[in-house]
Amino acid sequence: MGAGSPAASSAGVVAGTPPAVTRARPRRRPSGEPPPLPRELQTSGKWWLGLAAAVVIFWIVVAVTRRAAVTVDVLDNWVLERVTSLRSDPLTAVMKVAGVLGTAYALQALWYANLLVLVIWRRWRHLFVWVGAMLTVVAIASGSAELIRRPRPVGVEILGPWQDFAMPSRPMTVLAAVLISGLYTLVPSGRLRQLGKLVAALALLVTALSRLYLAQDGLTDIVAGVILGVAIPLAAFRLLAPNEVFPITYRRGRTAHLDVTGRRLDAIQHALRDQLGVIPLEIKPFGLAGSGGSTPLRVKVKGEPDSYLFCKLYAATHLRSDRWYKLGRTLMYGRLEDERAFNTVRRLVQYEDYISRLMRSADLPVAQPYGIVEITPEREYLLVTEFHDGAVEVGDADVDDSIIDQGLEIVRKLWEAGLAHRDIKPANLLVRNGRVYLVDPAFAMVRPSPWRQAVDLGNMMLVLALRTDAARVYARAKRLFSEEEIAEAFAATRGLTMPSQLRRLLRQQGRDLHAEFTALLPTKLPSVRIQRWSWRRVVLTLLVVLGCIVGIAVAMSLLQSPL
């Protein structure tokens, strides 16, 4: 995370002292009142689910009551007789073309087109919800058809291809599901999606008329199939991938960075006022290039004078990223570190807030925490801290002996407090008015291994040497650390133990700072082995390999016969 903003807003503020922020009395959300950004089906979604429930009840009645089944047959035959009475050779040719979307080839083409776009744009959340919704629709349609076992229309010539039982119409069910899923995975929310809904409705109507005219389906078969095909994907996307959380966009960017506009922006503004009592004037994304595990925001708030707060927006996507990250480290390093994942987003945010307060109590130069703001219970939270206005990354600052000493003192204080930062890199060391600040303690550990503490020291010395030289940093380090501690730091720090930003900057400079430091050491210790094998690591590795094999097999089967 970098920093940089108009210095005027911090004029008159004493260095190291957070600016005064105007705070009103927080408002407790009454019981029963929805959170700032609730997950909801909306009115149309509830209606469609209600219709789907009515269809299920209808199926049960038809399956167990002979009189109801006869009544439905009479109704469908009456409708088909009226429609088929309009048949003519030219109209039949037109209707066969009009019903092309209900053919297996057209449905397969729509499936592959949707799949290709989702993979190219890496919308994995939408992809998983889409596949799950489609499989659910197909399974329910096939299962209900086998349960009801309704025959095709009798007494009317069927002019087109058909298969399976009639109730519900499987082509109409799948077509409705494909069209609705396509709208919620490919079309941005707003006017364009509303227009897409009209186009989808027209496509369903034309296809339905074609299948009625050709006597491929009965009226009730088509209505039941369309309701089922619309209701399930609609509910799935509104609950599992709502547009406010996972907006459709064709701009490239990190999936960790959530869209902060529209309803989410309004929710953040109201939540800050109600839960912290601060009055937000402006909310903008900030420092996105240096953040991959959250959505960082800079919030301008009312004060004397107006000032800024720094916020990190955490959501369920970041929780899943944390789990995959820690699983990857466990597979790479075994039991070298405690890589237990968090169970909820709330726990994730609570931990970072706790670590920030613990570091501040240990007199470490970290941002003052202001608290946690709930956006959606167990799904989205905002971590609010002081904003280091006018600060720059240490990689962009003039590094003198004072800056070097402050950076090394940070590591010494971490050691004395029994902590490790675990992500020391230029983006997490800010300099303002000659003072060094440590930021982003999300990966910090309490009572870390000696190896991890040594890595913190090695990375800090490498970061400080980027703007100076190894000899100068080594000379200042001997004032706080013994030669044995420094030697251990560089025995533990190498390759993957360095943050990716630090490795990239070292490559750009073309310097082997690690070799320069080890050349200055009176004694060189053997490299610390970072691989630790255990039964847990072996089992996890086998499970991951097995999961990949199963996933590939499922993907291949879906590609061969998804519908």
Image: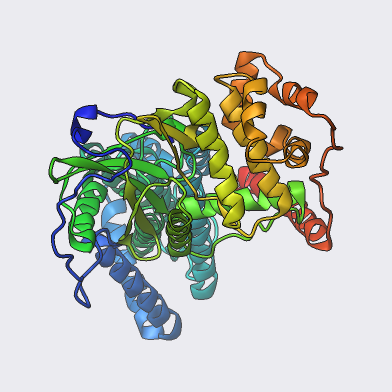
Q: Can residue 259 be seen in this view?
A: no
Q: Which residue sits at x=50%, y=36%?
A: 406
- Check the image and report above or below for 485 versus 352: above
x, y (%) of residue 321?
54, 49
x, y (%) of residue 385?
34, 50
Q: Which colour scheme is used?
A: rainbow
**Residue that lies at the very extreme toward the front in this rendered image:** 479
x, y (%) of residue 458?
67, 36
Residue 89 image-quadrant placement: top left
Nearer the observer, 432 or 345? 432
Residue 495 image-quadrant placement: top right
Q: Is residue 535 visible?
A: yes
Nearer the observer, 118 or 61? 118
- Check the image and report above or below for 285 versus 232: above
Q: Which residue sits at x=34%, y=61%?
A: 227
User: In the picture provided, is 170 more to the left or to the right than 562?
Assistant: left
User: In the picture provided, is 307 more to the left or to the right than 361?
Assistant: left
Q: Which residue sits at x=47%, y=59%?
A: 358
Q: How many labels does the image show?
A: 0
Nearer the observer, 318 or 210? 318
x, y (%) of residue 327?
66, 53
